[in-house]
Image (spheres, rainbow, N blue to C red):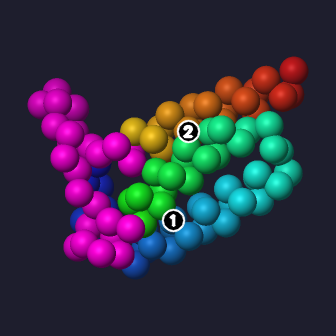
Amino acid sequence: MGLGGNKQIFFLVLIIAALGYLAYLFRRRPGVLTGLVIILSGAISNLLDRLFRPGVVDFIDLKVWPAFNLADTLIVIGVTLTIFALLREEQ
């Protein structure tokens, strides 16, 4: 959503740390696999944009919401599914 500005190195490190944490969660809780795979695909897509372009390309503009891309959507859906899966495991 264009929040990063010119902080490319910071976001690269953040994405790599998040991917490591997701790998840790996957090993500890395989029941959340679907959400984690969706998050991972969005994170990798944003990482590739940051590596090969000046920044992430936001190409969906609904005019009533900040511009975003499919990777952002995948991350939000994946986080939501993961939260629901973790809550269901606790019950």
Residue at the (82%, 55%) spot, across then down: 27
The residue drawn where x is 51% and y is 52% is: 41
| Foreground disc of the pair 2, 1 | 2
Q: Residue furthest left?
A: 63
Circle 1 Cα neighbour tier, 10 Å, few/some/many (<14 / 14–19 / ≥20): some
Q: Which residues are magenta?
A: 48-72
Q: Measured from the top left, where is residue 74 in percent x and y? A: 45, 41
Q: Position of residue 7 (x, y in %)?
A: 33, 73
Residue 52: say if magenta: yes
Query: What amino acid type should be assigned to the residue bearing mark 1?
Result: Ile
The residue under label 2 is: 78
- Horizontal side of 25 relative to 58 (left or right) equals right
Residue 81, placed above or below residue 22: above
Secondary structure of the magenta portion, mostly?
loop
User: Closer to the N terminus: mark 2 or mark 1?
Assistant: 1
On the rendered image, what quadrant is the C terminus found in? top right
| For residue 26, above or below residue 44 | above
Q: Is residue 60 visible?
A: yes
Q: Quadrant of residue 62?
A: top left
Q: Is residue 64 above or below residue 68?
A: above
- What residue type is disc 2 on? Gly
Local crowd at mark 2 within 10 Å, few (<14), some, or many (≥20)? many
Name the residue at 27% across, 44% down.
Answer: 68
SS category of the residue bearing label 2: helix
Residues at badges 2 and 1 in contact (C-beta under 8 Å)?
no
| Place of residue 83 in the rendered image (x, y in percent of width and height, measured from the top left) | 66, 33
Residue 7 seen in the figure = no
User: Mark 1 = which residue?
Assistant: 15
Rendering quarter of residue 31: top right
73 relative position to 27: left or right: left
Q: CA distance from mark 2 to mark 1?
A: 15 Å
- Callout 1: SS: helix
